Image (cartoon, grey):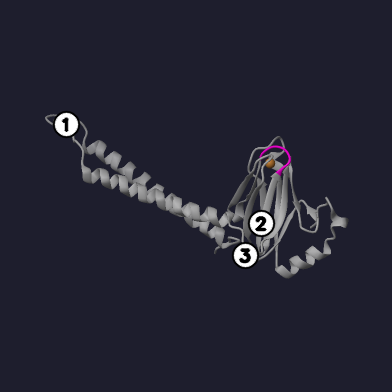
Amino acid sequence: MNSNPNSYADFVDSTMIYVVSISLFFLIGISILMVYFVFKYHRKKGHKPVDIHGSILLETVWFIIPTILVLTMFYYGFIGYKKFKNIPANSLEINVTAKMWNWDFVYENGLNLDTLYIPKNRSVKLNLISTDVNHSLYIPAFRIKQDVIGGKQHYLVLTAEKVGSYNIACAEYCGVDHSAMYTKLIVLEENDYNKWYEANNPKLVTNEKVN
Ligand SMILES: [Cu+2]
């Protein structure tokens, strides 16, 4: 059963399977041929080696096929990148600050949390900055990762299609407590999210963890 939280993760998975399948095909094929040729063309008495000088057909084939394969890999990568960077018109914007060694999520009403809450089926744009060193926002279940370079603005776009709780990690070594720089992404039904958003008055919960 598919446990991915959205179709973007499915797309990344199929791209990965595509690239790995092609790589495995050539790895296994070339390895078998190499062993076969070692036996077939080993030194034999009475045989003189012959030089082969060029073959337009062969050279064209081994130029064109790998080029097409690499271009299709690039194409899928580029499509994935565009989905990841395309900002739909009604996106919910959340400002994210990375710092040694936690994440800060600030909502439009000033609500400031260390856990990320988002509604289901709504595109969310995370505006990312770092107040110190380089970090990287990584949400493995969503197959997304965005570096957050100190002093630069970054963003990423995601839409969750399933309610649930997912891990958020820092994927860029950022000091002694880097390995503890974890938090959660909580996806709520839109109604629940709206209730939660209204119920969390920023004045009461600023800088506190809300669960
Ligand atoms: Cu970090």
Distance of label 3 from label 1 (alpha carbons): 63 Å
Image x and y of residue 14, in percent: 48, 57
Distance of label 1 from label 2 (alpha carbons): 64 Å
Residue that sits furthest to the left in the current view: 46
Q: Helix, strand or loop at disc 3? A: loop
Q: Categorize mark 2 by other alpha carbons within 10 Å: few (<14), some (14-19), many (20+).
A: many
Label 3 vs label 1, nearer the camera: 3
Residue at position x 47%, y 54% in the image: 76
Residue type, label 2 = Lys
Disc 3 CB within 8 Å of nearest ligand 1 atom? no
Residue at position x 54%, y 53% in the image: 81
Label 1 vs label 2, nearer the camera: 2
Q: Which one is earlier in the sequence, the residue at label 2 or at label 3?
A: 2
Magenta range is 130-134
132 in magenta: yes
Residue at position x 13%, y 31% in the image: 47
Q: To which residue does mark 2 refer?
A: 125
Q: To which residue does mark 3 refer?
A: 161
Horizontally, residue 69 falls left or right of residue 120, namely left
50 in magenta: no
Residue type, label 1 = Pro
- Checking the image for residue 18, the label placed there is none
Q: Which one is earlier in the sequence, the residue at label 3 or at label 1?
A: 1
Picture quarter containing residue 83? bottom right
Label 2 vs label 3, nearer the camera: 2
Q: To which residue does mark 1 refer?
A: 49
Residue that sits furthest to the front in the current view: 89
